[in-house]
Structures are given as structure tokens and as C-alpha cells.
């Protein structure tokens, strides 16, 4: 069987250029960013500091991180030379996420509710608990992400957008879906998936942003565990638990430490604060760019401020030089108003970034006439995109010079003949 590292897709210049860091971490040739964060001492007691002080410290440590990251990336410094610090940069991030939870501003809704009390709810309807709907080796993601061993995907429950056509409605629209997972249980699931051969830990939902506090703390706990007692508790949510995967420490080994790339699979409707916290722990971004204007975002997702928020977050991660693959779903009757403006914006603002122009839209939830929740106001969305619509999206991406072929066509049901 081919190994992940020997897949032909890595020979494609646009993939190699855009996903180089992720590739190195996935193959345990470089440490994940969270391992670098652990080496950066925080000179304050995070639990005692004011929130403003924590942000100031975060800004300072972020600069230190960039210096270390560049040296490690260029092989001018080894992680072995850097002792683990306590408290460290990760502890600052964990504490900041906990403080934010008390006046929740994880995403652009900026609801300002105290989710630890549970007396008032924001748009996502969540309190402080996180639920995992399922976790498993995802074999349906893009080739560099699913590789040969699958993408270690953790589906968190609920969402901060309310897409009428949601293709994961059972997870996104039902806040009680799944099993309550503590940060420790999430970390254990990450450990299990990686030791079983997954190439990354793929955090998705619903939407991972609304679980920021749980996820950041889980990442701070990552290590080689020796806990076979808790494993059966989390295995209730493991969708492929019946498969006989063997756990091999070598799949995650980097200088005796547990190593895995962290992948953020998100609608990007997050706040600047959330993006700032994620910067030094996400190794590869898999953002969605759905709507080309706010009118469609409000009508189909009941989400205001969509375009400015999502485009700004995309631009920021691009300017930071992050590893990114963008996803855009071609929707029926939305090629002119959404697909084209989104692709044009990407070509102008994020040149060279690979885009998966996805053809797999199917009518679901309120857009599916066979669903009890069907709403006739969305009858324009109650069909698959036509062949002409999908081919027009491909043609336009090609005209704009977007590198999309390698990431899009391996699973496309349409030929590329434009
Ligand atoms: S995560 Fe977003 S939607 Fe949920 S309470 Fe916080 S700001 Fe509101």
C-alpha cells in the first residue's frame, strides 16, 4: 500500500507550496505548533491575571512564537533544545478561552452571554458543555487530508450558522446530539485517532469555533496517554469503532512526544479574538466560503455580516502565511450571485491558494421536499446543481487562474471538459 508521504499529490507544486508545514508535521518531520507553544514561558499566573493582561501577554508570546517557528521551519533550531515551560503560551490560550466563555465572543454574533451560567443562550444555544456527535477516520476528505489512513475527524454538535440546506443537519441543528465530552475525553480521542494512523486531527461540526474552550484545553492536554479505562467511555461516539485499527505509537512520534497536525474545518464566522488564539495551534486550515453576498447569507443561513466577516478572516490567515485549502460548495441557482463573487474574491485576495470547488450539494433539511422540515420558500434550492452550473463554476475558476483542479477533480462526478 502507498504511504501518505509517497502520494503523487505531494508532487504537485501548488499542493506542496501551500501545504508544506502540514505535510512535515503529518509525517512527524516537524513538531505541531502546539508543541512549540509549550516551550514558550508565560511570565504571569494565567488564572490570576486580568483578561487585558492575558491579551497583552498573548501578543508578546505570539511574537516569540513566530521567531521560534521560523527557526524550526528552517531547521535552524530543534525542539530538543527548548525545555517545556510552565506556565506556557498554551496555558494563556486556555485561560483566555475560559474568560471569553463568560461573555461569549467566540464568533461574530458576539452574544456576550455567560455560557458558564446557562441562564441565557446565544445564537448557538450552547452552554459550557461540549458534545461530540461522532469521531472516526474520515475517508471522504480531500486527498492530502484523508491520505491513506483517513483524517481523524471529530464532529462537534451545534452551529453558529443556520443554513437551510445544511448537509449535516442532525449534528448542527440538534444541540443534544452526541455525547458530552470533557477536554480530557477530546484529547483522548485525538490520541486514539492519531495512533490508529490518521494523518491529522480534523476539528469540525456543526462548527468547532463554538467549542473553542474545550478544544484549546484538549490540545493543551495532548500527550501519549496510558488510559485504557476511559477509552470505552469515549468509544460510544466512535463511528468506526467496529474496525480493528491497531494503535501504534510510531504514528505520532516526534522526539519522544505526541505529535499531530491540528486541522480547523470551519465556516470562518469567528471573532478576531478566536482567530488570534487559533493562530499558533492550527497547522492547516480548511475554511468554507459559501456566500458571495450578505443577502444570500441572510436568506439561506440567517447570518448577517457574513461576507465581511468571512472574507476578513480568510484574508488574515492568508496574510499570516498559513497552510490553507478553501472549500466552496456550488449551490443551485447561486453560481452568479455566490460562486463567481467568492471565486473572484479568492483570486484577487488569496492568489495561489487551492480551492475545492465542490459539486456535491444535495437538497437537505429545509430545502429537501421529502424532509418534514421542508420550507417551500427554499424551493429554488430543492434540486441538485445542474451539470452546466458546475461546469460554469469550473470554467470560471480556471479563467481566474485558481489552482483547483488537483484538489477538486479526484472525486468530481463531472468530467472536466470546459
Ligand atoms: S459561540 Fe457565537 S453564537 Fe454561540 S454564544 Fe458565543 S458568540 Fe454567540
Image: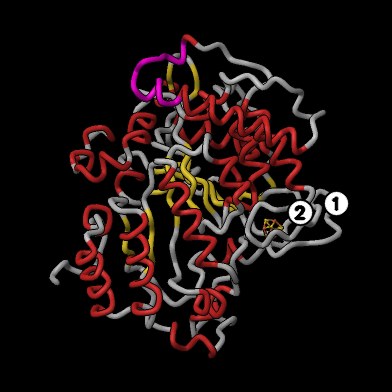
Asked whether 275 or 145 is in front, the reply is 275
Asked whether 394 or 402 is in front, the reply is 402
Question: Left or right: where does residue 384 sit relative to residue 16?
Answer: right
- Expressed as whole percent of the image width and height from the top left, the position of residue 96 reads 70, 38
**Mark 1 surroundings within 10 Å by alpha-carbon count, few (fewer than 14), some (14 through 19), many (20 or more):** few
Q: Residue 149: in sight, yes or no?
A: yes
- Expressed as whole percent of the image width and height from the top left, the position of residue 85 reads 62, 16
Q: CA distance from mark 1 to mark 2?
A: 7 Å
Q: Which residue is mark 2?
A: 127
> Residue 196 falls in which quadrant of the image?
top left
Residue 348 lies, with reference to residue 54, above or below; the image says below
- Expressed as whole percent of the image width and height from the top left, the position of residue 211 reads 64, 48
Mark 2 element type: loop
- Expressed as whole percent of the image width and height from the top left, the position of residue 71 reads 40, 20
Chain part drawn in magenta: 69-80
Q: Residue at x 68, y 33 (%)?
A: 56
Q: Which mark is residue 117?
A: 1
Mark 1 near mark 2, Cβ–Cβ under 8 Å? yes
Residue 27 lies, with reference to residue 235, above or below; the image says above
Ligand 1 is found in the corner quadrant, namely bottom right
Q: Earlier in the sequence, mark 1 or mark 2?
A: 1
Mark 1 element type: loop
Q: Is ligand 1 less than 8 Å from the beta carbon at label 2?
A: no
**Mark 2 surroundings within 10 Å by alpha-carbon count, few (fewer than 14), some (14 through 19), many (20 or more):** many
- For the C terminus, the quadrant is bottom left
- For the N terminus, the quadrant is top left
Amino acid at each position: 500500500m502507498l504511504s501518505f508521504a509517497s502520494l503523487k499529490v505531494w508532487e504537485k507544486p501548488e499542493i506542496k507550496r501551500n501545504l508544506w508545514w502540514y505535510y512535515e508535521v503529518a509525517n512527524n518531520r516537524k513538531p505541531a505548533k502546539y508543541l512549540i507553544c509549550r516551550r514558550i514561558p508565560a511570565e504571569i499566573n494565567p488564572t490570576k491575571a486580568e483578561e487585558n493582561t492575558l491579551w497583552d501577554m498573548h501578543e508578546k508570546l505570539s511574537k516569540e512564537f513566530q521567531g521560534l517557528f521560523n527557526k524550526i521551519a528552517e531547521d535552524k533550531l530543534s525542539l530538543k533544545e527548548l525545555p517545556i515551560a510552565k506556565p506556557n503560551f498554551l496555558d494563556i490560550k486556555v485561560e483566555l478561552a475560559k474568560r471569553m466563555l463568560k461573555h461569549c465572543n467566540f464568533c461574530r454574533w458576539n452574544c456576550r452571554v455567560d455560557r458558564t451560567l446557562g441562564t441565557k443562550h446565544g445564537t448557538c444555544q450552547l452552554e459550557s458543555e461540549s458534545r461530540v456527535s461522532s469521531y472516526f477516520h474520515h475517508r471522504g476528505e480531500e486527498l492530502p487530508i484523508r491520505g491513506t489512513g483517513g483524517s481523524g475527524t471529530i464532529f462537534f454538535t451545534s452551529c453558529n450558522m443556520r443554513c437551510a440546506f445544511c448537509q449535516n443537519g442532525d449534528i448542527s441543528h440538534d444541540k443534544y446530539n452526541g455525547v458530552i465530552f470533557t477536554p480530557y475525553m477530546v484529547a483522548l480521542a485525538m490520541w486514539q485517532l492519531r495512533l490508529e494512523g490518521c494523518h491529522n486531527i480534523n476539528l469540525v461540526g456543526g462548527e468547532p469555533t463554538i467549542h473553542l474552550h474545550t478544544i484549546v484545553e484538549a490540545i493543551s492536554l495532548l500527550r501519549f496517554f496510558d488510559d485504557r479505562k476511559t477509552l470505552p467511555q469515549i468509544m460510544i461516539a466512535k463511528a468506526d469503532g467496529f474496525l480493528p485499527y491497531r494503535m501504534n505509537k510510531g504514528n505520532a512520534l516526534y522526539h519522544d512526544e505526541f505529535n499531530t497536525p491540528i486541522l480547523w474545518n470551519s465556516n470562518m464566522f469567528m471573532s478576531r479574538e478566536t482567530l488570534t488564539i487559533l493562530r499558533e495551534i492550527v497547522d492547516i486550515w480548511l475554511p468554507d466560503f459559501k456566500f458571495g453576498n450578505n443577502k444570500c447569507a441572510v436568506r439561506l443561513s440567517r447570518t448577517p455580516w457574513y461576507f465581511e466577516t468571512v472574507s476578513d478572516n480568510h484574508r488574515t490567515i492568508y496574510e499570516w502565511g498559513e497552510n490553507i485549502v478553501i472549500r466552496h460548495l456550488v449551490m443551485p441557482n447561486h453560481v452568479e450571485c455566490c460562486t463567481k463573487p467568492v471565486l473572484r474574491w479568492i483570486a484577487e485576495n488569496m492568489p495561489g491558494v487551492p480551492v475545492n470547488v465542490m459539486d456535491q450539494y444535495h437538497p437537505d433539511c429545509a430545502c429537501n421536499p421529502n424532509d418534514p422540515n421542508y420550507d417551500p420558500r427554499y424551493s429554488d434550492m430543492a434540486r441538485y446543481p445542474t451539470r452546466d452550473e458546475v461546469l460554469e463554476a469550473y470554467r470560471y475558476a480556471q479563467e481566474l487562474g485558481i489552482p483547483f483542479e488537483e484538489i477538486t477533480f479526484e472525486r468530481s462526478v463531472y468530467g472536466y471538459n470546459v
